[in-house]
Every structure is written in structure tokens, then in C-alpha cells.
Image (cartoon, rainbow, N blue to C red):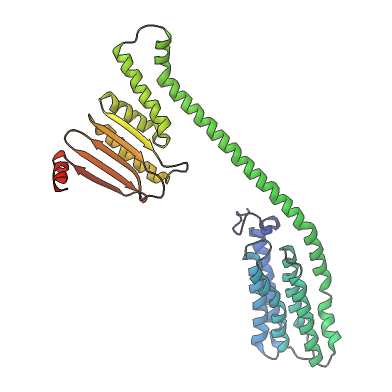
């Protein structure tokens, strides 16, 4: 399974399957082969640590090639990978004797070329050739010092130009195809998001129509009959008008649970006012749930007086407030952006004392 891209929406590693389990199995086998060759030829070198450090540098470069996000490959990883080949070759050749016991002693340039081939595919076409030229130069210098002449050492690496050229040509074919695939994927994602939004809007409209039909149809049919409305029916019309006004004036507060609580509070003689100044985006859903819970509790407990529920404008420390006022006392509950709830209660006598102090 291919995991979602982490380095951006367009990362050719996804198209090449470089994040898959199979790719990592291949990389693991490749690194194992490098370690086996290093251990098998270790006795042929004059010093052990350069012969070990060189392959370790290329192993790190291989892992970076797989893990570093971005397309094309970012600048600093590109510089590091470009320098990895010549550096590893210089380390290994510094411990390589003039007379070779086995051709495997010079295998290090092949590992560097492999990295440069994949750098081409990852959008870097010039840097791999610079690194390749550096490996040729390092082998030529070693060959001169060993008394074989520059051509001998350079010839060991020049043959790797063939696979590097093939990788460069492949990149010219693969990368435009990858851009087309990414473009189609983005268009498909945008289309799916658009269809999802349209479906959600249609479902919400249907839900609102069903709710409105349940509330308003009986009274509308009664009005359409032409008969005089009773006092109870007129009161019902006033309640329905207040209910519909709330849904238009404070949509974020218009959940069915809060609507029902406001409706029943009005039937008990409570004046309910909803105000929504929260803007188009609205606060965090978890904070909205807290507002709904606090407002619903205030509406359920109110039997007279006034309940004002207000969503405050954005960029304020207080998201919403619920003010409950009766003849005997008033309670103000504020909900902060963090979801914290603060209650303040006062009585008419407290207000008189405050006025006298002023």
C-alpha cells in the first residue's frame, strides 16, 4: 500500500512506489549486498576504516534518496548526494593497493552511479553528472599514483555512463508523465470535494425543508382554510415566527436540540434572543458544543425573564455568552476560546450597590 505523500501533493516517489514495502525490501537487499561485498574484500585493503566508511556514506545517501521529501529533490540534499560518490570513492581508494587482488575492490563507483541514476528520476539532471565526473577524477588520480596512468582508472568508471545516460533519458519521459498523473489526481480530488460539498448541501437543505414542513405546514394549512385563528393558534404563530427568525439570525445556534429548548422556553413565557456575530467560519466545533450545552441548560431551567445567547465576533477571548435575566437575579456565562466556562451571578441589590458606588 502506498502511504499518502508527506513532502507535498506532487512527489514522484509515490509514482515510482518508493514508499511501498516492496521498495524497502529491495533497498534492504541492496544495502545488504553492499555490506557483504565490503566485508568480503576488507582483507584486500591496506587500512580497514576507509574501506568501511566509504560504503557507509553511500548507504546513508541511499536512505536519504528514499526518505527526503520534495520534487524535485531539495538543494542541500542534492549537494550532499552529489558529493557522496566522489567522497566514498576517495576513502576506499585511499586504502586500495596499486595491484588489485580482485575487481570487487573497485566496486564503490557502481554504488555511486546507482544513486546518480535515481537523482535523475527525482528531478536533478545536472548534479548527477557532476558527481559522476568527480568519481572519474578520483579514480584517475588514484590510477596515476598507482602507476597505471589516468586512463586505467577513468576507464573503470566511464562504463557507468551508459546506465546514467539511460536514467537521464528515462527522466525526460517519466517526469512529464508524472506531472500529467499528478494533475489528473488533483483534478479528481477537487471534483470529489466539490461533489461532496454539493451532496452535503443538498442533504442539509432536505433536512431543513423536512424540519420546516413539520413545524409550519399545520399552521399554514390552518391559515389557508380561511377561518379565524384562535388565541392559542395566534400564540403558536408567534412562537413559530420567533423560531424561524432564530434560524435566520443565528444559524450556528440553530441545532434541533437548541431549537426545541428555545421553543419550550417561549411557551413558558421566556423571552429568547439569539445573536450570531461569529462570522462565516465560526469557532472550533468543540467550543460550539460547549456553547450549545450551556445555552440548552439555561433555556431548560428558565421559567420567566429573558435568555440572550450571543456568539461574539472572531479574534476575541470570549467566543459566546449566555445571559439569563429574571426579576430576582441575573446570570452571565462566558465561554472562552479554550472552551473554559466562567459564570457571574448578580442580584438587583448588587446592581443598586454598584450604582451607589459610582
Q: Position of residue 128 (x, y in %)?
A: 75, 71
Q: Position of residue 322 (x, y in %)?
A: 30, 39
Between residues 230 and 260, which one lies in front from this camera angle? 230
Q: Position of residue 101 (x, y in %)?
A: 78, 87
Between residues 71 and 103, which one lies in front from this camera angle? 71
* Tally of marks: 0
Q: Position of residue 272 (x, y in %)?
A: 30, 31
Seen at 66% across and 47% down, the residue is 186
Residue most toward the front?
Answer: 358
Asked where in the image residue 14 lies, by quadrant, the reply is bottom right
Between residues 218 and 248, which one lies in front from this camera angle? 248
Tell me if residue 202 comes above or below residue 11 in the rendering: above
257 to the left or right of 13: left
Asked where in the image residue 229 lies, by quadrant, the reply is top left
Seen at 16% across and 46% down, the residue is 354
60 to the left or right of 144: left
Tell me if residue 196 comes above or below residue 87 in the rendering: above
Asked where in the image residue 305 lies, by quadrant, the reply is top left
Seen at 35% across and 41% down, the residue is 291
Q: Is residue 107 visible?
A: no
Amino acid at each position: 500500500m502506498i502511504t499518502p505523500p508527506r513532502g507535498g501533493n506532487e512527489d514522484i516517489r509515490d509514482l515510482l512506489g518508493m514508499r511501498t514495502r516492496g521498495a524497502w525490501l529491495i533497498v534492504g537487499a541492496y544495502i545488504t549486498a553492499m555490506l557483504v561485498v565490503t566485508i568480503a574484500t576488507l582483507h584486500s585493503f591496506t587500512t580497514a576504516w576507509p574501506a568501511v566508511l566509504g560504503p557507509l556514506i553511500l548507504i546513508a545517501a541511499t536512505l536519504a534518496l528514499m526518505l527526503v521529501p520534495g520534487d524535485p529533490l531539495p538543494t542541500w540534499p542534492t549537494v550532499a548526494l552529489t558529493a557522496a560518490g566522489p567522497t566514498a570513492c576517495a576513502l576506499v581508494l585511499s586504502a586500495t593497493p596499486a595491484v588489485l587482488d580482485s575487481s570487487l575492490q573497485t566496486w564503490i563507483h557502481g554504488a555511486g552511479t546507482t544513486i546518480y541514476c535515481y537523482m535523475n528520476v527525482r528531478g536533478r539532471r545536472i548534479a548527477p553528472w557532476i558527481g559522476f565526473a568527480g568519481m572519474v577524477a578520483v579514480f584517475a588520480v588514484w590510477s596515476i599514483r598507482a602507476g597505471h596512468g589516468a586512463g586505467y582508472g577513468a576507464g573503470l568508471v566511464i562504463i557507468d555512463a551508459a546506465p546514467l545516460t539511460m536514467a537521464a533519458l528515462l527522466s525526460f519521459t517519466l517526469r512529464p508523465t508524472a506531472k500529467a498523473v499528478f494533475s489528473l489526481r488533483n483534478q479528481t480530488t477537487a471534483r470529489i470535494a466539490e461533489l461532496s460539498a454539493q451532496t452535503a448541501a443538498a442533504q442539509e437543505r432536505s433536512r431543513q425543508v423536512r424540519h420546516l414542513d413539520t413545524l409550519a405546514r399545520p399552521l399554514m394549512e390552518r391559515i389557508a382554510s380561511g377561518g379565524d385563528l384562535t388565541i392559542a393558534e395566534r400564540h403558536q404563530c408567534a412562537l413559530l415566527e420567533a423560531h424561524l427568525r432564530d434560524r435566520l439570525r443565528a444559524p450556528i445556534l440553530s441545532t434541533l436540540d437548541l431549537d426545541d429548548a428555545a421553543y419550550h422556553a417561549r411557551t413558558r413565557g421566556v423571552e429568547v434572543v439569539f445573536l450570531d456575530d461569529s462570522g462565516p467560519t465560526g469557532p472550533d466545533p468543540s467550543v460550539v458544543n460547549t456553547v450549545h450545552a450551556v445555552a440548552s441548560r439555561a433555556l431548560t431551567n428558565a421559567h420567566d425573564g429573558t435568555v440572550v445567547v450571543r456568539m461574539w465576533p472572531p479574534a476575541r477571548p470570549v467566543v459566546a455568552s449566555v445571559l439569563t435575566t429574571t426579576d430576582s437575579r441575573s446570570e452571565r456565562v462566558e465561554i472562552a476560546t479554550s472552551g473554559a466556562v466562567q459564570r457571574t451571578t448578580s442580584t438587583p441589590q448588587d446592581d443598586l450597590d454598584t450604582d451607589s458606588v459610582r
